[in-house]
Image: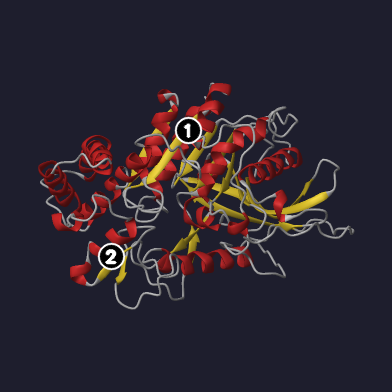
């Protein structure tokens, strides 16, 4: 494991860099003029010494000051990812244009265009790159240990939000956060850091949220519960995404079932008979006829031969991804199983050789750099860290303060919803996401007992980046509904 960096030298810091520009866009028939502000915000320790710098991108609608206009704070995951994916994929005023929404070319040129789905019509937008990602970094008396951990990360992002609200005089604005992938963990923990208290950060920020949006949701703790049957249920809940993928590639008999109807049928089997069979098999109590009946159901749902489950009733995502279209010499993607690449000559890199990430990453990164240079007028003297795994991920502190070991992050949301009785949550998932399956996320929400009347579950015919594949519009509209309902 890499060791955290030592505190930096004490030296005078230059003023934070800021870049502003003005543009207009049409969204939902409205012509909207807005100002972009890209730049640094310094973070401080309790001695008021600078320890970190967060680079963010703010889009503020022009017009008379409106202190009650909603603000949406947006970030991606990792840990180690910048916010460029949501920025250029669905939320920001500009959007990457790929030559195809599924299986696009990954060689330039790529295009950028105004985003007709941007949420700037209903909220001002703030894209946050946590310390260690993008152009955000450790400075002054800081060390990576101040930022690289579940609690540390949430506290630093909360401080950024606190400072942003003060700078822009928006303390009375309705506030929303949107987090994708690990960002869903950050979004679940943030209400605690924003409120503060004697048992957590030791002081009170007193900031509450109107809404939380989770995408590519992962809410199980790193050291998840070891209670009887928990591991088997986690395994069973991987099945629906495999079955959805088989449905998409027409490897099963659809029998007129829609994707949603099929998904619900498989999920019921996974949570019931399949989870029970896994527990019985582990205990050596599953008879041969019972095993044959289960493997027959698995074959009918996944499109694989029953013999694929002879050695074990469970299968990893990676193995399924290699098996499903093996007769065509193809592998399906982990991040979006609609995408394919040849099975042969893979380098086995989990991202670079993934049929989805390997395809759309170059377009997103190129579109981002074009946007910040041409539209936002940003000039920086160091590379932008789109996703940073080296040092950051091996050093990440998963230990948490003030909560029982192994507590689900869904429980953090349940606590936040108890504290804030108007807080609403949208959980958005892609049917074809093998990276963060929809079924386990929804099961975690169910087990934590979140108030059903304030939680909305949505699934989209897409993958981990669920706004790819003609689903950006429906997702953005669901977020609009959340914002409007939460500000009534």
**Does 339 appear above or below 115?**
below
User: 200 or 84: which is nearer to us?
Assistant: 200
The spot of residue 328 in percent (x, y) is 20, 70
Q: Is residue 46 left or right of residue 87?
A: right
| Quarter of the image that includes the N terminus | bottom right
The spot of residue 154 in percent (x, y) is 64, 42
Nearest to N terminus: mark 2 or mark 1? 2
The spot of residue 102 in percent (x, y) is 33, 62
Quadrant assignment, res 281: top left
Q: Is residue 443 left or right of residue 403?
A: left
Which residue was labeled with disc 1?
Answer: 425
Q: How is the image coloured?
A: secondary structure
Instruction: Kindly report which numbered mark, 2 or 1, lies closer to the viewer in this rendering.
Output: 2
**Does 330 appear above or below 458?**
below
Helix, strand, or loop for circle 2?
helix
**Does 391 appear above or below 462?**
below
**Residue that appears at 46% across and 75% down:** 109
Helix, strand, or loop for circle 1?
strand
**Residue that appears at 79% across and 46% down:** 44
Which residue was labeled with disc 2?
Answer: 322
User: 477 or 465: which is nearer to us?
Assistant: 465
User: 165 or 60: which is nearer to us?
Assistant: 165
Q: Is residue 276 left or right of residue 155?
A: left
Q: Is residue 2 left or right of residue 278?
A: right
Disc 2 to disc 1, how far (Cα)? Answer: 35 Å
Quadrant assignment, res 176: top right
**Does 340 appear above or below 83?**
below
Quadrant assignment, res 334: bottom left
């Amino acid at each position: 494991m890499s060791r955290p960096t030592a505190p930096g030298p004490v030296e005078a810091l230059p003023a934070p860099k800021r870049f502003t520009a003005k543009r207009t866009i049409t969204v939902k028939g409205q012509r909207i003029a807005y100002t972009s502000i890209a730049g640094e915000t310094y973070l401080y320790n309790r001695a008021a010494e600078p320890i970190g710098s967060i680079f963010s991108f703010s889009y503020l609608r022009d017009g008379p000051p409106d202190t009650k206009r909603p603000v949406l704070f947006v970030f991606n995951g990792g840990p180690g990812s910048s916010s460029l994916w949501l920025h250029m994929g669905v939320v920001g005023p500009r959007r990457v244009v790929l030559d195809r929404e599924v299986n696009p070319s990954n060689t330039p040129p790529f295009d950028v265009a105004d985003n007709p789905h941007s949420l700037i019509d209903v909220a001002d937008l703030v894209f946050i790159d946590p310390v260690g990602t993008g152009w955000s970094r450790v400075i002054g008396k800081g060390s990576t240990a101040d930022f690289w951990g579940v609690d540390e990360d949430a506290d630093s992002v909360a401080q950024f939000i606190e400072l942003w609200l003060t700078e822009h005089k928006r303390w009375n604005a309705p506030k929303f956060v949107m987090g994708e992938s690990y960002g869903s963990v950050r979004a679940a923990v943030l209400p605690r850091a924003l409120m503060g208290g004697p048992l957590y950060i030791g002081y009170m920020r007193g900031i509450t949220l109107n809404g939380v949006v989770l995408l590519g949701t992962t809410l199980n703790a790193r050291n998840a519960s070891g209670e009887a049957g928990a591991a088997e249920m986690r395994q069973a809940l991987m099945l629906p995404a495999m079955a959805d993928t088989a449905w998409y590639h027409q490897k099963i008999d659809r029998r007129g079932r829609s994707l949603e109807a099929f998904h619900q049928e498989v999920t019921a089997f996974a949570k019931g008979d399949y989870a029970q069979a896994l527990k019985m098999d582990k205990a050596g109590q599953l008879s041969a006829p019972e095993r044959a009946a289960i493997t027959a159901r698995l074959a009918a749902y996944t499109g694989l031969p029953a013999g694929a489950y002879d050695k074990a009733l469970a299968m990893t995502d990676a193995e399924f991804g290699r098996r499903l279209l093996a007769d065509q010499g193809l592998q399906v993607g982990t991040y979006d199983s609609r995408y394919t690449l040849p099975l042969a000559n893979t380098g086995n890199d989990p991202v670079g050789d993934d049929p989805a990430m390997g395809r759309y990453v170059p377009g997103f990164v190129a579109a981002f750099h074009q946007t910040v240079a041409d539209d936002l007028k940003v000039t920086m003297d160091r590379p932008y860290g789109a996703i940073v795994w080296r040092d950051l991920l091996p050093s990440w502190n998963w230990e948490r303060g003030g909560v029982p070991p192994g507590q689900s992050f869904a429980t953090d949301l349940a606590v936040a919803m108890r504290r804030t009785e108007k807080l609403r949550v949208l959980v958005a998932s892609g049917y074809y996401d093998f990276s963060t399956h929809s079924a386990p996320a929804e099961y975690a929400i169910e087990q934590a007992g979140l108030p059903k009347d304030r939680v909305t579950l949505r699934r989209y015919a897409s993958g981990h980046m669920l706004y790819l594949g003609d689903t950006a519009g429906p997702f953005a509209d669901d977020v609009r509904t959340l914002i409007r309902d939460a500000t009534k």
